[in-house]
Amino acid sequence: MNHAPKAKRVIQLFMNGGVSQMDTFDHKPVLANLNGQKFDPGDGRLVESVTNSPGFKVLKSPFAFRRHGECGRWVSEVLPHMASVVDDLAFLMSMNSPTNVHGLGSYMQTTGFTLPGFPCMGAWISYALGQINQNLPEFIVMPDPKGLPYNNLGNFTSGFLPARHQGTVINASDSRPVRYLFPPAEARHINAASEQASRNILSALNENHASRTPGGTWLEDRIQSLEMAARMQLSVPELFDMKGESQAVKSLYGMNEKNTEDFAKRCILGRRMLERGVRFVQIWSGAGGPSKNWDNHANIHTELPYMTRQVDKPIAGLIKDLKARGMLEDTLVIWTTEFGRMPFSQGQAGRDHNGGTFVTWFAGGGIKGGTSFGQSDRWGWKSDKGTTSHDMHATILDLLGVNHEKLTVRHNGIDRRLTDVHGQVIRDIIA
């Protein structure tokens, strides 16, 4: 830690697939005026699409926008609940990505590189700050129950950092959310005596291996992971016991409603993890693949509301709940995606990938609510200040008390860091 932190813990909400900025938070009325016309920025710049957008015809947003909160933030009608908490949010309106490809974009947002093999932000935070609670992992990931996102486990990797810093993946919808934590019911041969005998043999094997491979960390990391699993056998049942949550809290998140019950449960569990000392929690909306995520190629009218209905109320509920408990002051909440969408249509009513601009917002620990930084052009095609994932990561580390330029690890002769050789802390949104 390099300076006094404003935030102690982080919960990141990742919308997998590329959220359409001009249909959610980035109001572009000019699109209505140009609807159906050929998209032409007028300055000779080349207009390209990633997959197939013949004609490049401007597509207006089918959703009504309205100003909300004292800050007057424009929000689409598809996010009525998040609209109610905009005074607690700080918007990065000019995020961009060097790629329009899902896997590369996800890597860029999670690791700061488009190539695989680099540690993700959660791993860097774990490496820099360590554990708060010795009975729970410092970095937990809850994917969408429909499946893992693009890159699968690569988004949660520790890369060249010690393996103990990788994300612990929990399937919150499973009857056994943490796999292999307890023996299966049919394994009646496993008892206290057999487990002790197994530990004795394993200890002897470990000592033998350690003597033959001095300096290696894999065995130590493996031992620590098994010791953590043993401690989790005591802590996890209580963590997942939702009986103590009131009906008012469950209603606030939408846990008793069909559309929102899954994401609401994961948001509540995320808050419970933070309360119990987990440092970094990542919750994903949308699995990898061509449908049922935020990758709205075919029909923005139907595909976007399908996703927003699942997350809007739970996310607003999380902000309100953290605030009511006094946790928002030192909990950093991040909402993001890998890139945005194009201002012109793909097919009749879809939108293609757009790394040129998209929206991210922060809330909580050290953030100045009701503010924004940067803006996109009048079509929502490109951004002005070009806020990058490196800037986002630098700001997150700064809020946690870490100087991003000093958090380095020597790897293959290079001092590697989360922000590579880039990154500026976005002071405009920090209180």
Image (tube, grey):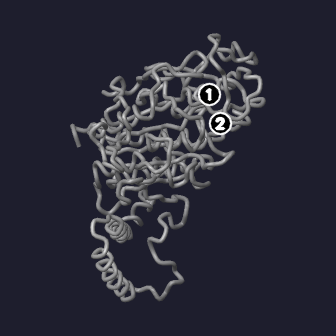
Q: In this picture, is 139 found above or below 213? A: above
Q: Which amino acid does label 2 sit on?
A: Leu
Q: Position of residue 213 (x, y in %)?
A: 31, 71
Residue at image location 34% in from the left, 29% down from the top? 425
Q: In this view, does 321 lie to the left or right of 102?
A: left
Element under disc 1: helix
Label 1: few (<14), some (14–19) or many (≥20) C-alpha neighbours in 10 Å: many
Give the spatial CA distance, label 2 vs label 1. Answer: 8 Å
- The reply to whether residue 3 is in sight is yes
Q: Quadrant of residue 387?
A: top left
Q: Tell me the tag on residue 304.
A: 2
Q: Position of residue 247 (x, y in %)?
A: 48, 51
Residue farthest along the top direction in this orientation = 42
Q: In this picture, is 63 found above or below 11? A: above
In the rendered image, the quadrant that contains the C terminus is: top left
Element under disc 2: helix
Residue farthest along the front direction in this orientation = 413
Using the image as rendered, state which of residue 211 and residue 385 is in the foreground.
Answer: 211
Residue picked out by circle 1? 23
Using the image as rendered, state which of residue 212 and residue 58 is in the foreground.
Answer: 212
In the rendered image, the quadrant that contains the N terminus is: top left
Residue farthest along the left direction in this orientation = 3
Q: In which quarter of the image is residue 200?
A: bottom left
Label pair 2/1, CB-CB below 8 angstroms? yes
Q: In this picture, is 282 found above or below 221? A: above
Q: Quadrant of residue 39?
A: top right
Q: Which amino acid does label 1 sit on?
A: Asp
Using the image as rendered, state which of residue 265 and residue 12 is in the foreground.
Answer: 12
Q: In this view, does 380 lie to the left or right of 141?
A: right
Residue at image location 60% in from the left, 55% down from the top? 147
